Image: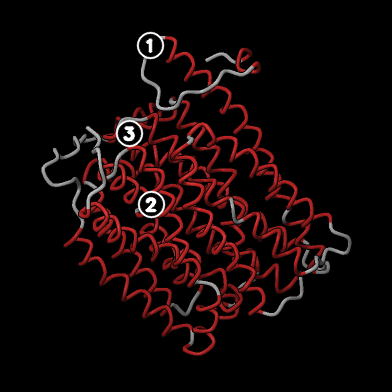
Amino acid sequence: MPVDRATKQAWLIWSTAVVVYIAALFHRTSLGVAGLEAAVRFDVGPAALGTFTVLQIGLYALMQVPTGLLVDRFGPRRVLVAAALLMGVGQVMFALASSYPLGLAARAVLGVGDAMTWVSVLRLAAAHFPPRRFTVVMSLSAALGGAGNLVATVPLTLLLGNAGWTATFLIAGAATALYSAIVAWRVREAPDGAPQPPVEAVPLRTVAKRVAWAWRVPGTRLGFWVHFTSMSTPAMLGLLWGFPYLVEAQGMSRPEASAVLSLLVVVAIVAGPVVGSVIARRPEWRMPIVGWYLAAALVCWALLLGWPGGVLPVPLLFAVFGVLALGNPASGVAFALVRDYNPLHRVSTATGVANVGGFAAITFSALAVGVALDLVSGLPAAQAYRIAFLSVVSLLVLGVWRTAVWWRRARAAVFAAAERGEHVPVRLRRRRWDVLVEA
């Protein structure tokens, strides 16, 4: 049974857990401003550099369903402890790596640890907070995670320039690994006096059926495509290609480029709790907010790819990156949908399925951009990035189409459930175009 109020213990447990997520965002995005240094350190070109992100984010995406199963089976506390240890070890390995294969191995370990954080934090929020408070806590978690992303922009750029590669990443990795002890000490699976969430042992032979069950829920499917479209663009720019694009194609200095990238984070930190509060009070506004963001994102990409000469005025670049940054708060709608339409004891698996969406898109686009840049290396940088970013826009268009399809189908499922007299989390007003949809 869901809790009816948020206690001091709930906030303490959540704050302890969200620090792991903040660390995960730092480690995940640290290559965004260290990409040019990594290319020199490991003596690699754009495609090989993109492989760092492809491997890390690809493993993240592949680990989402297993992570959901692990959280459902062993609880978020144990999974978060393992996540902090793995991220710490991976970053220490990356600090000491002197060859490309060792660097890839380090990012793989880091990616596996990173993959275990978000689903665990959401499961703790679902267990310790009332359902309507969940959206606010989720948005606040994402916003605070942006603090880790923010540290991985201008501060990390300055630290790399002064302390150097090895010392910077060695300290970050060791601190993360040590923090796992605090997580083990302070985090609890359920509120005091509340029954522990039911544990379901899932044999390997039933994993596919469990994932298929989650995928059949229209709210899960819609969450997948919302995450695919909203989260992928700002993350792709922040994780790897935004910084080189701003420096090489737009002619910015490194501090200027870091400032633009930091806008991706600052906007998300400010807008995240606002969006969370709005959709908590008016959940029927969730998908319209996503729709308006996707329309604005298409306009922004049209400007980036179609501006005469390819070099945009600096104020316009800030504006474009600021609008694209809203994708991170908008992507939180995916997890609110999953939380509303899946039972608590299996919500982590469904969350993992939805979370695959954005990271699958990032994996493909990061690799496609790197390969395209290698193929057009003889062209001017602005023109080369225009061509390479076409793959990102193609994925965005695909995601917009599928989001629209499953928005309508999910609405049809809600109307059908209401007509059968079943409880529905959100009451919707039927529109004329809903009549054309079959549940």
Along the line of sight, the residue nearer the viewer: 370 or 239: 239
- Under circle 3, the secondary element is helix
Q: Amino acid at mark 3?
A: Val
The answer to the question of whether label 2 and label 3 lie on touching residues, with beta carbons closer than 8 A, is no
Looking at the image, the residue that sits furthest to the right is: 308
Q: Which residue is mark 1?
A: 421
The answer to the question of whether label 3 and label 1 lie on touching residues, with beta carbons closer than 8 A, is no
Q: Is residue 204 above or below residue 234?
A: above
Residue ID at (73%, 64%)? 317
Along the line of sight, the residue nearer the viewer: 368 or 215: 215
Along the line of sight, the residue nearer the viewer: 102 or 438: 438
Dot in front, 2 or 1: 1
Residue 343 placement (x, y as % from top left)? 31, 30
Looking at the image, the residue that sits furthest to the bottom is: 162
N-term mark: 2 or 1: 2
Q: Amino acid at mark 1?
A: Gly
Q: Which residue is mark 3?
A: 207
Residue 41 placement (x, y as % from top left)? 55, 80
Residue 177 placement (x, y as % from top left)? 28, 70
- Under circle 1, the secondary element is loop
